[in-house]
Image (cartoon, rainbow, N blue to C red):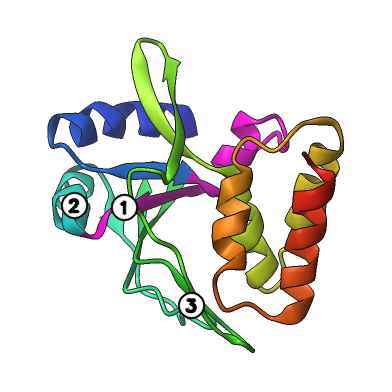
Amino acid sequence: MIESVISLLSPLFASAHVRWGIGGSVLLAHHGLVEHPNDVDLLFHPDDFAVAERILKQFGKQQPSQDKGVFLTRRFEEYTIGSVELDLIVDFKIQHKAGVFSFIFDETAMTEQVSFGGQRYPFMHLEDWYVFYLLMPGRESKVRLLEDYWQSHPLDAPERLQTALAASLPDSIRQRIEHTYRYAQ
């Protein structure tokens, strides 16, 4: 069902020139790290979110907003299409004890355009989601999943970890990223 929803939205986003990326558990599933994604996390370029939301409103139902917790994200909207939950994220930010981590959505935010059934899908970098999961409460299992994965697979985008290290981060997270950067190449 998740694939059919992404297949529905992808050509619509493409024809509207929406810059977007697939992350979260769908990204992990794409790399064979989880079998069943929980939901669909879609990040959007800030300039394209209004268009993306108009497209989604044609097919999905917007859900009530929930408490943001540590997230200082400018826009976070939840939609459902059929039984599939989608999280729409713009200007992704996470507050932590050393400050605020801000994700820059630019032309380097996508690692690849993967083709399925003649359509192309923009997947984000595992390395970015590793940093996100380190900063998000309750995501240690996903952090370990990625660290285990990199024991037998090289980093695809080590520069993404270098970029994260230039940001304000708690020392414990900085040390973990540095360790992963050194040993996963």
Say left or right for 103 vs 163: left
What amino acid is found at the position of numbered circle 3 in the picture? Phe
19 up-or-down from 179: above or below: above
Which quadrant of the structure image shows residue 141?
Answer: bottom right
Say left or right for 69 vs 138: left
In the rendered image, the quadrant that contains the C terminus is: top right
Say left or right for 121 vs 33: left
The answer to whether residue 2 is visible is yes
Part of the protein shown in magenta: 23-46
Upstream in sequence: badge 3 or badge 2: 2
Residue 62: image location, x then y, percent: 29, 60
Residue 113: image location, x then y, percent: 41, 26
106 up-or-down from 110: above or below: below
Upstream in sequence: badge 1 or badge 3: 1
Residue at x-position 82% and y-position 58%: 179
110 up-or-down from 115: above or below: below
Q: Name the residue under label 2.
A: 48
The local secondary structure at tag 2 comes to helix
Label 3 packing within 10 angstroms: few (<14), some (14-19), many (20+): some
Q: Mark 1 points at which residue?
A: 44
Residue at x-position 69% and y-position 66%: 134
Label 2 packing within 10 angstroms: few (<14), some (14-19), many (20+): some
What amino acid is found at the position of numbered circle 2 in the picture? Asp
Residue at x-position 86% and y-position 38%: 151
Does the CB distance between marks 1 and 2 fall below 8 Å?
A: yes
Q: Distance between the residues labelled 3 and 2?
A: 21 Å
On whether residue 84 falls in the magenta region, the answer is no
Which sits in the foreground, 68 or 18? 18
Q: Name the residue under label 3.
A: 71
Say left or right for 166 vs 5: right
Label 1 packing within 10 angstroms: few (<14), some (14-19), many (20+): many
The local secondary structure at tag 3 comes to loop
